[in-house]
Amino acid sequence: MKKNGFTLIELMIVVAIIGILAAVAYPSYTQYVVKSARAEAVTALIDAANRQEQFFVDNYDYTTVVANLGLQAATETGLYTLAIASVANSRAFTITATPASGVAATDSGCTSLIINELSIKTSTGTETADECWGR
């Protein structure tokens, strides 16, 4: 008599292997998702800084209102919110991207990304600015 199918031990070995692979792959996947969210924030900040410089050329002053730059206060997917800080007639500004929702809100490595009028890129959180900005 010929046996068809798999034994219970064979199935348990396959389940164990799948579990080990998932345990190894999931942290890498979540790290990839967090880094892609940061890339969205970096892109939004650089775009906002460029628009802020154009606003200065047109108005001889920086704005503190994101809408004046033709942007929304949130990034395209809503993972980050943008805020501008500037002192009137100071010739300086900082733009901050702060996690708002989703995977970005759980990112303790980079709790905010910041760029200023000199294009100096900083961050807050447990990771360095270079790690947060993807350099």
Image (spheres, rainbow, N blue to C red):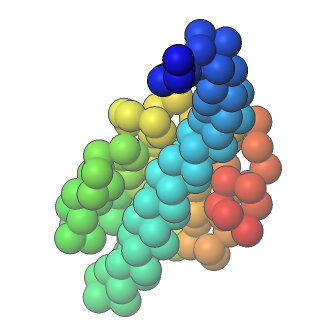
Q: Quadrant of the C terminus?
A: bottom right
Compared to residue 1, the image places residue 119 above or below, namely below
Residue 10: percent from the left, percent from the top? Answer: 65, 20
Residue 87: percent from the left, percent from the top? Answer: 47, 57
Comparing 70 with 32, the one in front is: 32
Residue 103 at least partly seen: yes
Residue 18: percent from the left, percent from the top? Answer: 61, 29
Comparing 51 with 11, the one in front is: 11
Compared to residue 45, the image places residue 127 above or below, namely above
Is 18 left, or right, of 85 in this rendering?
Answer: right
Hey, which residue is sitting farthest bottom in the picture? 57
Q: Residue at x 47, y 39 (%)?
A: 104
Q: Residue at x 63, y 75 (%)?
A: 118
Q: Residue at x 62, y 74 (%)?
A: 119
Is 20 left, or right, of 99 in this rendering?
Answer: right
Hey, which residue is sitting farthest front in the picture? 1
Hey, which residue is sitting farthest top in the picture? 8
Compared to residue 76, the image places residue 119 above or below, namely below
Residue 56 at least partly seen: no
Residue 34: percent from the left, percent from the top? Answer: 55, 45
Comparing 17 with 50, the one in front is: 17
